[in-house]
Image (tube, coloured by chain):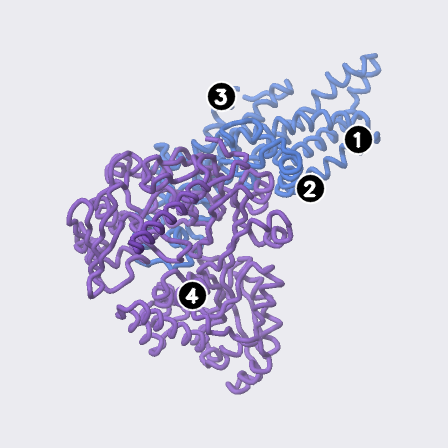
Amino acid sequence: MHLYALKRILQFIPTIFFITLIMFVLLNILPGSAAYLALDQRKAPDPKLIAQLEKEWGLDKPMHIRYLNYLKGLVTGDLGKSFLRKESVSKIIADRIWPTLKLALASLGLAVAVGLPLGFLSALRQGSWLDSLSMIGAVSGISMPQFWLGILLMFFLSVKVRIFPTSGYGEGNPMYLVLPAISLGVGYMALIARTTRAAVIDVLTMDFVRTARSKGLSELLVNSRHVFQNTMILVLTTVGLQFGSLIGSTVIVEKLFSWPGIGSLLVDSIYQRDIPVTQGCILVIILIFLIVNLIVDLLYAVVDPRIKYQ
Amino acid sequence: MKKKLTILLSVLAIGMLACTNAWAARTGGTFVFCAPYGGDVFSLDMQRTGNTQDYIVGLNIFRSLYKWDAAQNKPVLALATAVDVSEDGMVYTFKLRHDVKFHNGRTMTADDIIYSYNRIMAPATASSAASYVGVIKGAKAVQDGKAQTISGLKKIDDFTLQITLDHVADLGYQLYKIEAAIVPKEEIQAKGDAFGTAPVGCGPFRFVKWIKGSEIVLEKFDGYFEPGKPYIDKLVYKIMPEGSARDMAFRARELDANLVGGAQYDVYQRDPEISKNMIEVAEMYTRFMGFNQAYAPLADKRVRQAINHALNSELIIKKLLKNKAFKATSFLPTSSPAFDPELAPYAYDLKKAKALMAEAGYAGGFDLEVLATNSQSYGVRVVEAIIPFLKKIGIRVKPQQLEGGMLSQRLKKGDYQAFIWSLESGPDPLASLNRFHSRTLPSSGNYIAYANPVFDGLLDQAKIEKDPAKRLDLLKQADRFFFEDAPGWFFNYNKAIIAYQPWVNGVEAVAIEMMLQDFTNLWLNETSPRATAK
């Protein structure tokens, strides 16, 4: 198992290499100059100033040289310096990573805590009012745009009834976390509920469930030991795969709630062509994605003893 | 005796007036404002950023030699008590204030101003203020790396500074911007790049903390040179690019004032409570559709005038922009000192437009491709709105949407037929019109490659004219000439609106950019939920 994990981690290297290459090329061939965009365009920026900025940011060098410099920095853990923020990218990202992880984990917690039991109960009570209600809820949850949901939550829970603050980070005060976490987590929760329901229904028709029942096991034991365990693989896959995209989709929620995370940082950097920060953010998001996937793979073995890694 | 008494009485009356004002303004409390534009705040080193969002915050931390006075709508002295301008308008001698302190406690002197301007011109700083400070003699040599210090700056003593210009200019317009802020040398040398995240200025508020991507907190600087000011204890900027999120925060009373976007304006106006506390201004940005005169049909002045007559700007502003704009007359906005109130905008007159088209030999019309961004107030949706109007005079409009950076590249190359964009048209009318001087290259903002000897002549005369009234008159003539020559469609001036809570006093109508609010004079009633918050 350790060997397997090590092998997987080593595989990260070529993956990251290819991703950085694609990313670098794409970001650098985008039309529009970073120096130009950094200035107020309504004023017609001074060409001399643009040249100075391009020199400061190293944009006057050919692309392959810049890429090699970037790789050199990457090996030593140096992600470069932001064009606009005049700070090292690692520091900027370090400041912003925790809020994003906090938001993502809170959404994940909410989604699993509500989605999993909901899906399970719906499957066991197929066709009941609980099932219909929760599935209607799940479909609406998946199809509801996060942005719109966020505004609705603000309107009802911050403006009409003043329970939660509308936006901001509030120096880690958990009250500020609630609305963004719900906006981000509802779709995810709905997805987990649906997946769990489908998986449970599938497992319920299996032979071993019938056997367990015919052995005279109580419904509780059948469900907890046989059904639950066997649905976990599928649910775990969904949770793991979706966690990566959850990190990616913090973009909208962070912007809406002025949440100081990686998502809003990424959007700002793309708009302003702050190439070093954009690259840094994408790299971090990819790393999180890879690590989560690895953890999920390792968890398979824990959940299902038949799976062994060599 | 009687005369003396009158003087004494008037002095007393003025004193009492001043006192009542001082009584009226309540001290204390926290004011929560927003930084609403696009993205994040990037750097608080004013000299090294080009981001309006950064200036909104920096304006209250720093001070420049001059500052913008919103009430008088012009630049006034900030760090000096008096200025003496030489006969030929080339030498400015400033009597600096003795009581200006940086937030680290040190008194500001002439050396700081010299240091700051040298830093702005140094190539390594790449400052957008270089184009303003560049008016000083010898500044360009520093920018080109030929000199270390600006030769036109001379320290007479600690509090007397002499500035010699390179060419005649109204120095106030050059040096009032916060990009040209005066900074303390020792802080910059100690902090380096980190100065941008822990700034030290000599403005009314001190930097306290910055949660990147979320908010910036400033607090009252006790050593600020205007006695008793600022009134509020704490100033918070929430970084909130989303209009609907700002609206919610404003309604939840978390924001004390909010920049009103197009989506909210209509709703706020109809709200009996909110509408009472709104302030609006015609910003010095002109939304203008520029014509490429190298495209044959547009080379004819009659065609260009016909387009102006055929477009019902008023209706488009009312229906499409929901009244969040002021109909434009000419290039210079109503808030410009050189705006000519006697000039009447092109009337919506289809008959006249058709006659002009026929006269020019284009009765059959022509195709016109218009480049635009995705802006709500001057983007592709506006181009779509003009299609039916111009169809009536035979012009077949085809919109093409581009991203801002791409659009400017096409304009610089002259690779377009027409475009619509928002162009800065103030505050200095001379600089604004000079954009269209034939010597200004398309790459420097003369996107329509305008070259007209009459217009050039008027501007050249204005440049050397020392009498301000005569200069203004020449500029009015130039603006009128530009208007009649119609090198574009004069669409609108941006209407900027701030809505504030009933307990807020002192939000100003700032025509250069509404969000550049100086909070030195702002105060809060005790009804504010944060009236005593520190």
Q: Quadrant of the C terminus of chain A?
A: top right
Cβ atoms at labels 3 and 4 below 8 Å apart: no
Q: What residue is rendered at 62% in x and 54% in y?
A: B266
| Amino acid of disc 4 | Leu
Distance, label 2 to label 3, CA atoms, is 42 Å
Write down the residue under mark 4. B411
Chain seen in blue: A
Cβ atoms at labels 3 and 1 below 8 Å apart: no
Q: Is residue B12 left or right of residue A299?
A: left
Estimate how packed mark 3 is, as few (under 14), some (14 to 19) or many (20 or more) residues with alpha carbons within 10 Å: few
Q: Position of residue B317 (x, y in %)?
A: 58, 64
| Amino acid of disc 3 | Leu
Q: Which mark is residue A131?
A: 1
Write down the residue under mark 2. A143
Q: Is residue B471 above or below residue B213?
A: below
Estimate how packed mark 2 is, as few (under 14), some (14 to 19) or many (20 or more) residues with alpha carbons within 10 Å: few
Write down the residue under mark 3. A3
Q: Is residue B182 above or below residue A50?
A: above
Tell me the subunit letter for badge 3: A
Cβ atoms at labels 1 and 2 below 8 Å apart: no
Quadrant assignment, res B519: top left
Which sits in the foreground, A101 or B118? B118
For marks 4 and 1, give the one nearer the viewer. 4
Tell me the subunit letter for badge 2: A
Q: Secondary structure at mark 2?
A: helix
Give a yes or no on whether discs 4 and 2 share a subunit.
no
Give a yes or no on whether discs 4 and 1 share a subunit.
no
Distance, label 1 to label 2, CA atoms, is 18 Å
Distance, label 3 to label 4, CA atoms, is 59 Å
